[in-house]
Image (cartoon, helix red, strand yellow):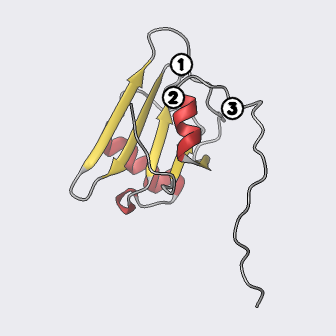
Amino acid sequence: MLTLPPGLRIYLATARVDGRKGIDGLANMVRSHFGRDPLQGDVFAFFSRRADRVRVLYWDRDGYVLTMKRLEKGTFRAPSSDAPGTHLAIEAAELLLILEGIDLRDAKRRSRWSPQTPAR
């Protein structure tokens, strides 16, 4: 089971990714398609074309960590798009729900309190 702190920035690739890509290929995708630096400690999730595998990439102080989950039956229900370079910023809880097989398309988020920025 993957444990993620709540304040972590997580980016989910909406375009499906070739399952043969390794750490370097995924890190290059983060740079070129997302416009982000993979060395900043953010987490990046990539789903395979068949949506039966997910790879989670992040930088851990002195090296990359790549975690993969393969479903023996069924598929993940992650947001998808054919447009390259598109991604979503999601919360840690949302990624964990997707990995557990929860379909978030019909889920509704209740409004929560958030601090307001002071007017200038």
Across and down, in percent, residue 44 comes to 46, 46
Marks 1 and 2: which is nearer the front?
2
Residue 50: which disc?
1
- Does the CB distance between marks 2 and 3 fall below 8 Å? no
**N-terminal of the two: label 3 or label 1?**
1
Q: CA–CA distance between discs 1 and 2?
A: 15 Å
Q: Residues within 10 Å of mark 3 (few under 14, many from 20)?
A: some
Q: Secondary structure at mark 3?
A: loop
Across and down, in percent, residue 14 comes to 60, 39
Across and down, in percent, residue 77 comes to 62, 25
Q: CA–CA distance between discs 2 and 3?
A: 11 Å
**N-terminal of the two: label 2 or label 3?**
2
Marks 3 and 1: which is nearer the front?
3
In the rendered image, the vertical position of residue 4 relative to residue 36, given as above or below: above
Which residue type carries mark 1? Arg
Q: Residues within 10 Å of mark 2 (few under 14, many from 20)?
A: many
**Residue tagged 3:** 104
Q: Residue at x 23, y 52 (%)?
A: 63
User: Disc count in the image?
Assistant: 3
* Quadrant housing residue 22: top left
Q: Residue at x 57, y 30 (%)?
A: 98
Quadrant in the picture for the C terminus: bottom right
**Residue tagged 2:** 99
Q: In this view of the protein, which residue sits in the foreground, 28 or 110?
A: 110
Q: Secondary structure at mark 2?
A: helix
Q: In this view of the protein, which residue sits in the foreground, 75 or 115?
A: 115
Q: Secondary structure at mark 1?
A: loop
31 displayed left or right of 65: right
